[in-house]
Image (cartoon, rainbow, N blue to C red):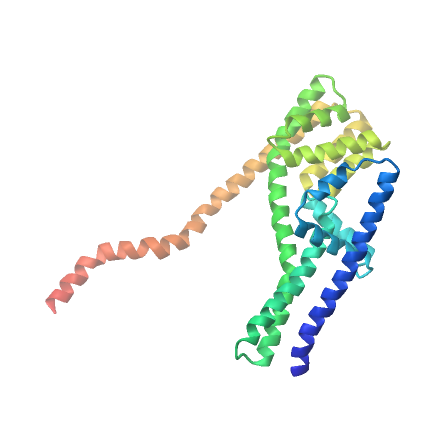
Amino acid sequence: MNLLLIGVPVFFLVMSGFAIVMLKLVIEEEKLARRIARAGGLSVAAEDKDDQQPVHIRIIIGLGFAIARSGLLSAKTLADLRHTLRMAGIRDQGALGLFVGAKLLMMVTLPAIAFGMTALTSLGELLRIGLIGGSAIIGLLVPDMVIQQRRKRFVKRVEAGLADALDLMVICADAGLSLEPGLARVASEIHETHPAVAQELTITSNEMRIGNNVRDALTALGVRTGLDSLKRLGSTLIQTIQYGTPLTQALRTLSAELRQEQLTRFEERAARLPVLLTLPMIIFILPCVFMVVGGPAVLKIMAAF
């Protein structure tokens, strides 16, 4: 047990030293890349944007990219992490580094805090080791929980604005705009009210403009987010292009289906309200009713005795 308690801070020191070394390597690599960019006359707008971030955020991002480039994580794991972040609507260049760096920082910081707190108490060695190990597990899971909450909010925002976007696409199609200019125009129009939907439509429009295969761009619309509604939109547009069916009719049908699904979800939530109110009524309302109804009788019985 004593060896384990001694090995915990040693492990923290080794991990911190490894992180500092890898962070220095990443910083030197970024400096070299910036010098090459300046020598080639390239734009440094992205560099100025990165410099505006707080120092501690840049340190965490650099630490995360250091871990990603060190080979500790496989290529498949990194691809899955990028896809998870994209499904949550996070598409910044430093998102992966921030996520990995936050996981490592939480995994090291929380056990260190737990070790310091348990060292001041008279807990048993097994309990101390369990608390330190549990804090490390919690540190690994906290960033995933944050991403899951971000994913839920992103899904709600997309589902709330997709039907309105389809109505605008119908108007653009009736006005004579083709698919790619229509997507770009709709994205610009709903950018203020539904930024999540506008972001997805903008990415799809750019992919259609740059690439040659429209089918791949529309398929990526659903794969990128993992939402069934966007997958249906992509498949509907692909079938419209492939078979030459009227675009406006297909969009109107899909918009009506999405609005009906939203109405169904609202009705389900309303139907759950009586069940959810049962427990608060039992706890807070029924005792008051019993006191009002049975209180006088209890007082009379007490007075009789």
> Most extreme residue toward the right, as rendered?
40
Q: Can residue 1 be seen at all in this image of the molecule?
A: no
Looking at the rendered structure, the number of numbered marks drawn on it comes to 0
Q: Nearer the viewer, residue 204 or 18?
A: 18
Image position of 199 with respect to 115: above or below: above
Residue 283 x %, y %: 36, 57
Residue at image point 80% right, 54% down: 26
Residue 85 x %, y %: 70, 48
Q: Nearer the viewer, residue 18 or 145?
A: 18
Q: Nearer the viewer, residue 181 or 2?
A: 2
Q: Quadrant of the C terminus?
A: bottom left
Residue at image point 60% right, 49% down: 149
Residue at image point 81% right, 35% down: 43
Judge from the rendering whether residue 43 lies leftward or rightward of residue 128; answer left or right: right
Place residue 51 in its image quadrant: top right
Residue 130 x %, y %: 61, 74
> Most extreme residue toward the top, as rendered?
175
Q: Nearer the viewer, residue 51 or 168?
A: 51
Residue at image point 86% right, 35% down: 41
Place residue 180 in its image quadrant: top right
Q: Can residue 178 be seen at all in this image of the molecule?
A: yes
Image position of 225 with respect to 288: above or below: above
Residue 144 x %, y %: 65, 55
Image position of 188 with respect to 147: above or below: above
Q: Quadrant of the N terminus?
A: bottom right
> Most extreme residue toward the bottom, as rendered?
2
